Amino acid sequence: MLDFWAGVAAELVSLDKWGNLYNQGISLFVAHNLVLQRKNMNAASGGVPGTGTGMLASKAVGRVSVGYDNSNVALDNGGQWNLTTYGMQYLQLARMIGVGGVQL
């Protein structure tokens, strides 16, 4: 999986745009996708792999429940990047260096 995601990252993370932060972009992209891959592997041993879930907002065990406010840690319009801390770091860097679409 590491080789697979590193290959995908090499195609999607542009050295021209990322410059000196290229290795960080590659690393965060790969780490994010490896965490999601591991989540799918864990689900395969007791759940349904490939199903999408958001960030955990609350959990209850018996009569005890705990809730979390994710609005402070989730990035606006972050989509699937909000599912891991690596993804959020990647998206923050991408936004700072302006890795949006290119108009020709």
Image (tube, grey):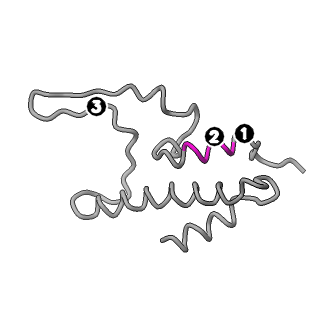
For the residues labelled 1 and 3, the Cα–Cα distance comes to: 31 Å
Task: Say which element carries label 3.
Answer: strand
Would you place residue 7 above or below residue 39 in this image?
below
Q: Are marks 1 and 2 in contact (CB under 8 Å)?
A: yes
Q: Measured from the top left, where is residue 93 in percent x and y?
A: 67, 44
Residue type (three-letter) at the residue carrying disc 2: Gln
In the rendered image, the residue lying farthest to the front is 20
Task: Say which element carries label 1.
Answer: helix
Q: Main secondary structure of the magenta part?
A: helix
Residue type (three-letter) at the residue carrying disc 1: Met
Q: Which residues are magenta?
A: 88-94
Label 2, on which residue?
92
> Which residue is found at the position 57% from the left and 31% from the top?
76
- In the visual, does 87 lie left or right of 38? right
In the rendered image, the residue lying farthest to the left is 62
Q: Dividing the picture into quarters, in which one does residue 62 lie? A: top left
For the residues labelled 1 and 2, the Cα–Cα distance comes to: 6 Å
Question: Is residue 89 shown in magenta?
Answer: yes
Label 3, on which residue?
58
- Sequence-wise, which precedes: disc 1 or disc 3? 3
For the residues labelled 2 and 3, the Cα–Cα distance comes to: 26 Å
Residue type (three-letter) at the residue carrying disc 3: Ser
Label 1, on which residue?
96
- Sequence-wise, which precedes: disc 2 or disc 3? 3
CA neighbours of label 3 inside 10 A, class few (<14), some (14 to 19), many (20+): few
Question: Is residue 82 shown in magenta?
Answer: no
CA neighbours of label 2 inside 10 A, class few (<14), some (14 to 19), many (20+): some
> Which residue is found at the position 86% from the left and 47% from the top?
103
In this view, the mark in front (1 or 3): 1
Q: Measured from the top left, where is residue 9 in percent x and y?
A: 63, 63
